[in-house]
Image (cartoon, rainbow, N blue to C red):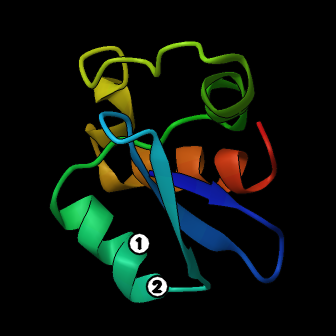
Amino acid sequence: MVCFGGEKWNVDLLIPKAGASVSFEHSKEVYEWCWDNKLPIISGEATRNWLYLGKPLPTREALSDTVASRVAYDTQAKSACNGY
C-alpha cells in the first residue's frame, strides 16, 4: 500500500506480480482494509524506484515494523502521504 497527497490523499495498492498500481481517491475504507489485512505501507521513494527504475519493492518482512501497531502504521502512512 502507498499513500500520497496532503489534504486530499490517495491510497494505491501495488500489485508487483502484475506490475500494476490501483489508486483509490481519498478512501478511508481502503486504508482501513489495508490495516485490517496488515498490508505494509511502502515509502514514496521505494514506490518511485519500483515504478520508474524497475527496482524490486521491499519485502513484507522488511516492512513488518509498519504493521507492528496502529500508531506505527498511521505514522508511516503520514510520512508516505507526504512523499517520503
Give the tally of numbered discs. 2
Tell me the quarter of the picture where residue 52 sits.
top right
| Location of residue 60 with respect to 8 vertically, above or below | above
| Location of residue 26 with respect to 50 vertically, above or below | below
**Closer-to-camera residue (61/14):** 14
Q: Residue 66 carries which label?
A: none
Q: Which residue, given by chain and number where applicable, does mark 2 sit on?
A: 28
Tell me the quarter of the picture where residue 78 sits.
bottom right
- Residue at the spot x=32%, y=18% of the render? 59
**Closer-to-camera residue (80/71):** 80
Q: What residue type is labelled 2?
A: Lys
Percent position of residue 10, x then y: 64, 72
Percent position of residue 77, x then y: 57, 53
Contact? badges 2 and 1 (CB < 8 Å): yes
Q: Which amino acid does label 1 sit on?
A: Tyr
In whole angstroms, how far apart are the C-alphas of marks 2 and 1? Answer: 5 Å
| Location of residue 77 with respect to 43 vertically, above or below | below
Q: In this view, does 26 lie to the left or right of 7?
A: left
Percent position of residue 39, x then y: 28, 48
**Number of residues whose C-alpha sits closer than 10 Å to that of mark 2, classed few (under 14), some (14–19) or many (20 or more):** few
Q: Which residue, given by chain and number where applicable, does mark 1 sit on?
A: 31
